[in-house]
Amino acid sequence: MVAAVIPAYGQESENWPRFRGPNGAGLAPRANPPTQWDDTTNVKWKTALPGPGSSSPVVWGDRVFVTCYSGYGVERPETGQKENLKRHLVCVDRATGKILWDRAVPGVPEEDASSGNLMEHGYASNTPATDGKRVYAFLSKSGVYAFDFDGKELWHTSVGTMSDGRRWGSSGGVILYKDLVIVNAAYESRTIRALKADTGEEAWQIKSDRLESTYGTPTLVEQPDGTTQMLIGVPNNLWAFDPDTGKNLWYCGTGLGGNVAPSVIVGDGLAFVFGGFPNTSSVAVKLGGSGDVTQTHLAWQGESGSYVPTPILLDGRLYWVDDNGFAVCADARTGKNIYRQRLTPQGRGKPVYASVVLAGDRLYAVSRRAGTFVLRAKPEYELIATNVIASDTSQFNATPAVVGNQLILRSDTHLYCIEARP
């Protein structure tokens, strides 16, 4: 018997409640969105957003939630005044695309300047999460906010206003566990924090300077004995904690130095850790143990890695499109590449930030400026389609949501519902 990723919200195909769907696996095997679209084909609706952002949309029933920012750092070269920065949580009607409500919260005096690599993704990169009753938004230095589905603020709390040496900003998404809201506030305070969902009161906190340059979203995994562990990749290590208490359970050296942005993927008794900077790689770690398991639990080091995008695990294979625009399929038992094929044109900067998601038997990979690629989820490389919304020249940094027969995409300017139209 091996540990399994927790199917946190059952198999309900109409909900995509957090970053990369239920427990961040990125899988919607029963979904069937279209494989082809453009400005006028298979776009159910298109909604202008109040500002840019790199966070992913989340969906519960007839509601879509997404975060944005405005007031500062939106336009170039004139960035505006830092004191005018606002972060937004926007609720959109999934049937029509109409904005139902928009809640804006102010930035803080300690906000980073609108310059450098921070502006590759901006001030709204943390994906919210919902339990169907409330939506929880981690808005970086503005804090963590809880709203009901009518947009009423229930509570908010600060989780820090620090920066790290690189000043690249924050990106980890919210996860929900039992009655806890868990956020990776490594950038804001070198902490991971659990807040009580009803009140926002802190339940526990993990604090360590070694969390600096940790940008990923934690992963929950159920153990064979019925207990749950929380995993997160940090520079040079994989850490495992008890999500009920925040207690460290075990750790394993990975050799992935610099910074770690992808989330940990779990399956087949292994944790798959990607990341590193300036050189990326991947490792597999056997789950379980106690204390330092580096000498006993490292299973393999892979041939390829990923700087920002998180892979998916399907039928013993790992699939991802890396930040350099290569589609990769690797054997999850060995880390050996099955294929590695360029998708995006070569150019300056990183052409891909979004993570691949599975819908049906297809992979959907969103690039920043070259469109969305649809590939067959099989060990032989097969590109089905490349879809470009030519009228939108902004960046597409966000991982899409998959619900039923729809794909929810967001760019720096718009939110789109992709659905087959008659």
Image (cartoon, helix red, strand yellow):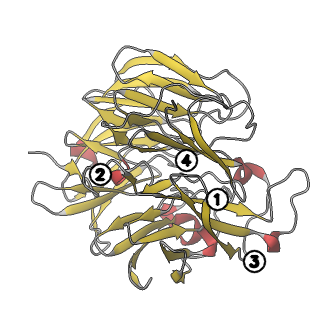
Q: In this view of the protein, can residue 308 be seen by the observer?
A: yes
Tell me, yes or no, whether the two marked residues, 1 and 3, touch with CB atoms within 8 Å.
Answer: no
Q: Which mark is residue 169?
A: 1
Tell me, yes or no, whether the two marked residues, 2 and 1, touch with CB atoms within 8 Å.
Answer: no
- Of the two numbered discs 1 and 4 on the same chain, state the one appearing first in sequence: 1
Going by the numbered disc 1, the residue's amino acid type is Gly
The residue that disc 2 covers is 12
Disc 2 to disc 3, how far (Cα)? 42 Å
Disc 4 to disc 2, how far (Cα)? 38 Å
- Of the two numbered discs 2 and 1 on the same chain, state the one appearing first in sequence: 2
Q: Position of residue 127 (x, y in %)?
A: 52, 58
Give left or right: position of 339 versus 75. left
Disc 1 to disc 3, how far (Cα)? 15 Å
The residue that disc 4 covers is 258
Disc 1 to disc 4, how far (Cα)? 15 Å
Which residue is at 36% across, 50% downward?
A: 14
Going by the numbered disc 4, the residue's amino acid type is Gly
Q: Nearer the viewer, residue 403 or 214?
A: 403
Q: Which mark is residue 109?
A: 3
Going by the numbered disc 3, the residue's amino acid type is Pro
